[in-house]
Amino acid sequence: MTNKKGATIEQLIEQVIDFRDARDWQQFHNPKDLAISLSLEASELLENFQWKTSEEAVKEKEKEIIDELADVFIYTMMLAHELDIDLTDAVTKKLEKNQVKYPVDKAKGSRKKYGEL
Amino acid sequence: MTNKKGATIEQLIEQVIDFRDARDWQQFHNPKDLAISLSLEASELLENFQWKTSEEAVKEKEKEIIDELADVFIYTMMLAHELDIDLTDAVTKKLEKNQVKYPVDKAKGSRKKYGEL
Amino acid sequence: MTNKKGATIEQLIEQVIDFRDARDWQQFHNPKDLAISLSLEASELLENFQWKTSEEAVKEKEKEIIDELADVFIYTMMLAHELDIDLTDAVTKKLEKNQVKYPVDKAKGSRKKYGEL
Amino acid sequence: MTNKKGATIEQLIEQVIDFRDARDWQQFHNPKDLAISLSLEASELLENFQWKTSEEAVKEKEKEIIDELADVFIYTMMLAHELDIDLTDAVTKKLEKNQVKYPVDKAKGSRKKYGEL
């Protein structure tokens, strides 16, 4: 495998699925357990920030953060693949929904949830 | 915004950051709170599978699952952008590490963690 | 320390706080990091169920499950102590709220959320 | 239900199980979904701290924090009941293990994990 700068998500998903299939892991990868796995990896990422400021975490745990963020992304792609979800399309449509929930004139500079705006 | 089939991750990140900057939200987006947010979105995704089989969840909650997976990916990209992490590179390198932790001959067909193989 | 069957929560909290103070850890235990820690421990508990049925998990990982559930409870008590929350009172009041959200005649035998009942 | 100051955990669990059984919910409460639920509630608790300092969160979201912490504790008790785990005993034994992992002379004033001490 080589670094493919500017790879499309589809190309990355192919790498991830090749890895999975070489190990015959699809049998375990039902959507519910993939969603559990994604949540676990997000927690492992967060663990690097426990008891620390952002600055301390980034300084002391940069490599671990990169690795865990990669794991989160890997499971995101696996679940998308399993459910036949087009991630590019999903993100684009979600941003469109968020534009309605968080209109610029109300949301600008605010950290409130849309229900509180 | 239009659906950009085959978009690179860099192009998607640009969309996400434009959305953020239009709302002046970078001030809140320190890495620690982004890692918290990623974990929260992964939980919201998982919530769609609570008390259900994979099949029931996908049937009853497909739209919600797509939206929440998009949110997970959006925060993954925001955190990567904030920490200047190249996601394509991070995934490629993580898969290489996982090849060592989970060699095909030992890991094939097994759901054990690498420490138990 | 000895097993105190039938201990009140206040007595258990005292044990937990003694443990903390002997290590001079209160300085790190701000509520936000305690909430993060609670979430991390809940994930470590959940990890024992990853890729498994309930039955497999309980059979293969019983000791780990007990330990992680204890950790969840320990952080629950630490956060309650830090914020001066009476857990007995909080649970009693939450159950009263839930009786309104999930009235027996509507919720009986249903796994729906209160918004869907 | 009345506030039982100084209640034992067993008494609280009885309240929680009565609530569950009145709704005939035991059929859904397999250990895996209870572990998922516990993780989800811990995330809902953490959500109150998102984008905020501890002080801001406690000031703006005190009631929500109390309610979510109660939910975490309720699911902790449900899972303990389902698996026949004595929480008092589990906490006492876990603190004993932690005394070995975090001896006072090494752990005092340090936020390091036991593997790093």
Image (tube, coloured by chain):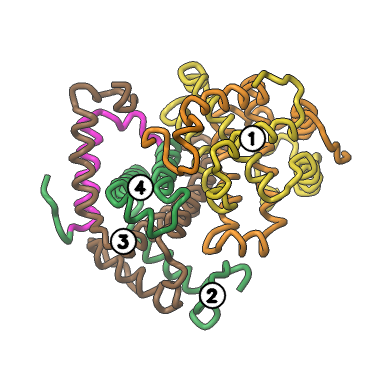
Chain colours: A brown, B green, C orange, D yellow
- Residue drawn at (27%, 62%), measured in percent from left and top? A84
Which quarter of the figure is the N terminus of chain C placed in?
Answer: top right
The residue closer to the viewer here, A3 or C22, is: C22
Q: Position of residue D113 (x, y in %)?
A: 66, 47
Tell me which segment is drawn in magenta: B7-30
Q: How many marks?
A: 4
Residue that numbered label 4 is attached to: B72
Residue that numbered label 1 is attached to: D18
Q: Is residue D29 left or right of residue B90?
A: right
Q: Quadrant of residue B27?
A: top left
The answer to whether residue B12 is magenta is: yes
- Residue drawn at (52%, 50%), measured in percent from left and top? A44
Determine the chain carrying the residue at label 3: A
Residue that numbered label 3 is attached to: A83
Viewer-nearest of labels 2 and 4? 2
Viewer-nearest of labels 4 and 1? 1
Indicate whether A17 appears above or below C62.
below
Residue that numbered label 2 is attached to: B110
Callout 2, which amino acid? Answer: Ser
Determine the chain carrying the residue at label 1: D
